[in-house]
Amino acid sequence: MVIRHALKEDVKKIMEIYEYARRFMAEHGNPNQWGPTNWPPEELIEKNKEKAAKKRQKRGEKAEKIHAMAQTNTRSISSSAKIEITSQSEKNDKIRRAEEQRSKAKPGSLSAKANMVKDYNENKR
């Protein structure tokens, strides 16, 4: 599959896809999102294409670069996430510090609310 920006000659096909989507949504209980009219109009699609092209130009993006990124096989990208291997004592130490911080939550804070839910759930058992 090739992913690329739409060209002027693609607009007719895009409009056919929107028509199919309108029919599909109406048949499945959503007749009002785009309505029975020709929404979005072809002029709006053209305007959005021009707007996107200006944004790409402003950011200095080249169509070739975007095309190359679209062709990237994500399975071949090596993970940049750092895998942290810790001992059980280090894990226990982290848990102890987290518990200490939990007890210092300011009233009304998100942490205090999370603590309230945790306490409630523990008392239900």
Image (spheres, rainbow, N blue to C red):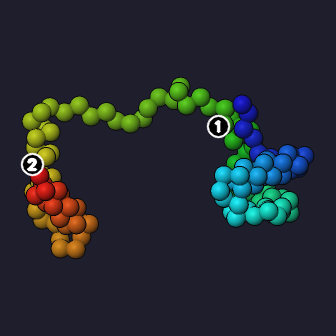
Look at the image and tell me whether residue 56 can be seen: no
Instruction: Describe residue 59's horizontal placement relative to residue 17 as left or right.
Output: left
Element type at mark 1: helix
On the image, the x and y values in percent for residue 97 come to 12, 51
Quadrant of the rendering where the N terminus is positioned: top right
On the image, the x and y values in percent for residue 112 come to 19, 67
The structure residue drawn at horizontal position 17% and vertical position 71%, both measured from the top left corner, is 106
Viewer-nearest residue: 21 or 61: 21
Q: Quadrant of residue 30?
A: bottom right
The residue where tag 2 is placed is 96
Look at the image and tell me whether residue 103 can be seen: yes
Q: Residue flagged by tag 2: what amino acid is it? A: Arg
Whether residue 71 is situated above or below residue 14 in the rendered picture: above
The structure residue drawn at horizontal position 55% and vertical position 31%, both measured from the top left corner, is 74
The structure residue drawn at horizontal position 65% and vertical position 56%, both measured from the top left corner, is 29
Q: Residue flagged by tag 1: what amino acid is it? A: Met
Instruction: Describe residue 91's horizontal placement relative to residue 57 as left or right.
Output: left
Q: Quadrant of residue 103?
A: bottom left
On the image, the x and y values in percent for residue 78 come to 47, 28
